[in-house]
């Protein structure tokens, strides 16, 4: 009998079929002499809703909580029922299953749940690869793993899913029914919201203070006293004291330094793309996923590693050859002319499931990529080439002078070798030190200097509001926002990778936008009144990053076979009882702060104003009514005058407007675009508006439990 290969997505299944020369296409599968490859559509199977366990749970009632089934039951996601039926039929015709879903915890869960629900007894092998090129697939099939090696990884994924279901459903139902409002919380999204709120609190509490620094000027060279003085009189008195005193060169230090960039993991790529192009974390992930899946030019994107393994070094020449064109050619050619030195980013110990994001051996015509894909591809290729160029070398000189025991310094830098900095990535280079660097003349130890003093005035600045890029960084390293500074817990959180994973952080941010807990103002993200109230209602453990740290530590132990999943889930059940009890006994109050004076056309109730990620809209406060009305929709179309993004305003009669004052009707916009591109027509614009409307409808959903929330009457 043939062997069944189970991929996670149709595109990956087609790549496998191509690599293995499987050519006979069927309904939901591709077949060859030895193998049949089929696919999931992401998750086909999920955990049942509470109402499926007992009809009594269809009604949201705080008295029914907590809901903790004796045994978790799987169910088919309705939209995926057809494909599951195909897979189940193919299992009857095959003798062995090769799991070829994404190489990670969630990929394992996708496959194992399908096999469990289909009651499969097949022998299991595992394909574990990080890119879907022909070579990677062939190499992977030549080194298939025993499926039993990944059984504990599945238990870890299963435990995570059950824990999130039990805690999420009970906490969300408890909050919603207790406070008569659509409220949701989760072990990752609520601490993320807390991080944003803490930063805003720090900004609001901040009071700017004026400070002074004394500078000694000698022939254009500025020697600065690093100490900030907050009393002007004290600063001027010190200058008076130091005038006419002997100024001597006390120390001269010249140090040759080298530094290098690191490879891209998903988080740093998302940060750079947000900084350069204002891409959201989700947009960057989608573009990178397309470059990996559809175009085959980048390796697996959902990685937390910035390094590659030793066995990959032999593939680097082919990867450089693949990018030896266009703007990259100058540097790729230079690298190919000498022996490749990759020691700066080869480290087996720092590679977990997947290595850094780098180009594959596949060549690409950039015209095949859309604008966003081209920008992400360029970022990754430039970083890859930088890694293969020599380090940046420079000599740093620091001169110290002593004036009556007060030390002043001046710093200078001389470049020796530009190295990787030959490839410019504007706005991404970070100076090693914020101290001003100058062109320094030659000084000698003990040399006496004659100069004058000046007073530099500055003001302390508050912390910056978060952007999506900096929020991702905070989620990865949230220890600065923890109230408990216990060193062991801090280390645990660091070791487990912070809040969420590289694969889930973008979705967490999107959930917070959709739930109405955060909103965007330009680049910055702020909490909404609803979000700030929610933090006051949620049990304290669910607000802290430490809960995630504890969970991830235990999940890692399960994946290694060091902890039984049954013991972990027993503790989750006890914890759920505690948080439900805490919410039930709460005497707090929730108030809508976004009620407008505009009444719903259907039910006559006042509507709520929602500031979504793509604009502003009104939604009826009656969840069963569900009436929604657009007020503003932010588009990707650019203003012909200032090139900023245009906004659609109006509900029935719509216009495109810009903050610079430019305005045009929808008809005028259509005609202008038709002339500019000869491609855009009324249908294109209408499709675009419908797309935006669909995205905004998604934003009215609070979380994964939105379908149940919609059943409530407020």
Image: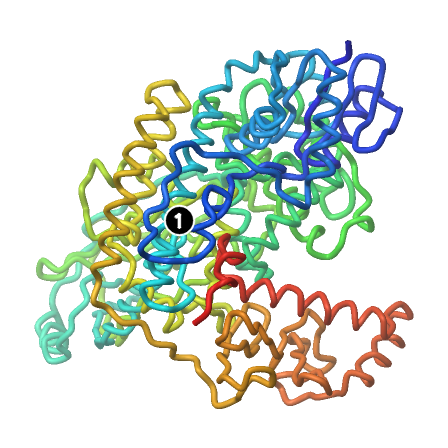
Q: Residue at x 38, y 24 (%)?
A: 558
Q: Is residue 20 left or right of residue 631?
A: right
Q: Nearer the viewer, residue 199 or 148?
A: 148
Q: Nearer the viewer, residue 239 or 41?
A: 41
Dot 1: few (<14), some (14–19), or many (≥20) neighbours within 10 Å?
A: many
Camera sees residue 558: yes
Q: Nearer the viewer, residue 98 or 622?
A: 622
Q: Nearer the viewer, residue 439 or 533?
A: 533
Above or below, 566 relative to 322:
above
Quarter of the image that includes the N terminus: top right
Q: Which residue is mark 1?
A: 168
Mark 1 element type = helix
Q: How is the image coloured?
A: rainbow
Camera sees residue 435: no
x, y (%) of residue 63?
31, 55
x, y (%) of residue 217?
28, 69
| Among the 4 quarters of the image, the one containing residue 229 | bottom left
Q: Residue at x 23, y 47 (%)?
A: 578
How many numbered circles does the render carry?
1
């Amino acid at each position: 009998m043939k062997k069944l290969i189970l991929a996670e997505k149709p595109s990956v299944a087609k790549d496998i079929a191509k690599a293995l020369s499987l050519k006979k296409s069927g309904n939901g599968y591709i077949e060859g002499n030895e193998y049949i490859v089929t696919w999931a559509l992401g998750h086909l199977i999920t955990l049942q809703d509470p109402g499926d366990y007992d009809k009594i749970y269809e009604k949201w009632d705080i008295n029914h909580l907590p809901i903790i089934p004796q045994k978790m039951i799987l169910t088919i996601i309705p939209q995926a029922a057809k494909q599951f039926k195909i897979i189940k039929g193919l299992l009857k015709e095959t003798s062995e299953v090769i799991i070829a879903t994404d190489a990670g915890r969630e990929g394992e869960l996708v496959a194992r749940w399908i096999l469990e629900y289909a009651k499969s007894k097949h022998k299991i092998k595992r394909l574990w690869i990080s890119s879907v090129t022909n070579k990677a697939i062939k190499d992977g099939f030549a080194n298939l793993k025993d499926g039993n090696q990944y059984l504990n990884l599945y238990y870890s994924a299963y435990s995570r899913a059950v824990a999130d279901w039990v805690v999420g459903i009970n906490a969300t139902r408890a909050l919603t029914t207790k406070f008569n409002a659509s409220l949701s919380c989760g072990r990752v999204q609520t601490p993320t919201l807390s991080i944003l709120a803490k930063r805003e609190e720090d900004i609001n509490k901040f009071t700017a203070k004026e400070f002074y620094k004394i500078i000694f000027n000698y022939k254009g060279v500025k020697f600065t006293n690093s100490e900030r003085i907050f009393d002007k009189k004290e600063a001027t008195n010190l200058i008076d004291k130091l005038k006419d005193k002997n100024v001597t060169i006390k120390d001269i230090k010249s140090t040759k330094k080298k530094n290098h960039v690191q490879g891209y993991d998903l988080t740093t790529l998302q940060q750079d793309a947000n900084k350069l192009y204002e891409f959201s974390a989700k947009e960057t992930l989608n573009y990178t996923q397309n470059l990996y899946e559809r175009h085959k030019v980048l390796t697996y994107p959902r990685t937390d590693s910035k390094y590659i393994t030793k066995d990959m070094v032999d593939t680097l020449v082919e990867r450089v050859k693949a990018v030896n064109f266009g703007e990259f050619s100058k540097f790729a050619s230079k690298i190919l002319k000498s022996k490749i030195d990759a020691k700066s980013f080869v480290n087996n110990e720092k590679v977990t499931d997947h290595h850094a994001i780098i180009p594959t051996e596949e060549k690409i015509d950039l015209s095949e990529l859309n604008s966003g894909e081209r920008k992400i591809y360029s970022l990754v290729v430039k970083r890859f080439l930088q890694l293969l160029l020599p380090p940046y070398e420079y000599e740093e000189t620091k001169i110290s002078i002593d004036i009556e025991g007060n030390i002043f310094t001046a710093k200078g830098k001389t470049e020796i070798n530009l190295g990787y900095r030959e490839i410019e990535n504007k706005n991404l280079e970070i100076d090693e030190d914020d101290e001003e660097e100058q062109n320094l003349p030659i000084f000698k130890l003990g040399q006496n200097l004659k100069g004058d003093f000046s007073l530099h005035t500055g003001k302390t600045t508050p912390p910056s509001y978060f952007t999506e890029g900096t929020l991702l960084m905070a989620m990865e390293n949230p220890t600065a926002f923890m109230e408990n500074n216990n060193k062991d817990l801090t280390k645990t959180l660091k070791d487990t990778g912070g809040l969420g994973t590289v694969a889930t952080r973008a979705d967490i941010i999107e959930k917070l936008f959709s739930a109405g807990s955060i909103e965007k103002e330009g680049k910055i993200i702020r909490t909404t009144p609803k979000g700030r109230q929610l933090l006051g209602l949620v049990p304290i453990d669910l607000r802290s990053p430490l809960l995630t740290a504890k969970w991830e530590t235990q999940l890692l132990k399960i994946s290694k076979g060091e902890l039984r999943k049954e013991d972990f889930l027993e503790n989750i059940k006890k914890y759920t009882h505690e948080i439900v009890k805490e919410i039930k006994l709460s005497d707090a109050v929730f108030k809508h702060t976004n009620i407008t004076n505009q009444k719903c056309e259907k039910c006559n109730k006042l509507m709520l104003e929602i500031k979504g990620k793509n604009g502003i809209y009104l939604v009826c406060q009656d969840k069963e009514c569900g009436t929604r009305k657009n007020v503003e929709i932010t588009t990707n179309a650019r203003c012909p005058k200032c090139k900023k993004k245009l906004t659609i305003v109006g509900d029935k009669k719509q216009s495109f407007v810009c903050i610079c004052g430019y305005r045009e009707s929808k008809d005028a916009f259509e005609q202008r675009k038709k002339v500019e591109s000869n491609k855009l027509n009324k249908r294109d614009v209408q499709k675009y508006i419908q797309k935006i409307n669909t995205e905004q409808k998604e934003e009215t959903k609070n979380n994964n439990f939105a379908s149940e929330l919609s059943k409530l009457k407020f």
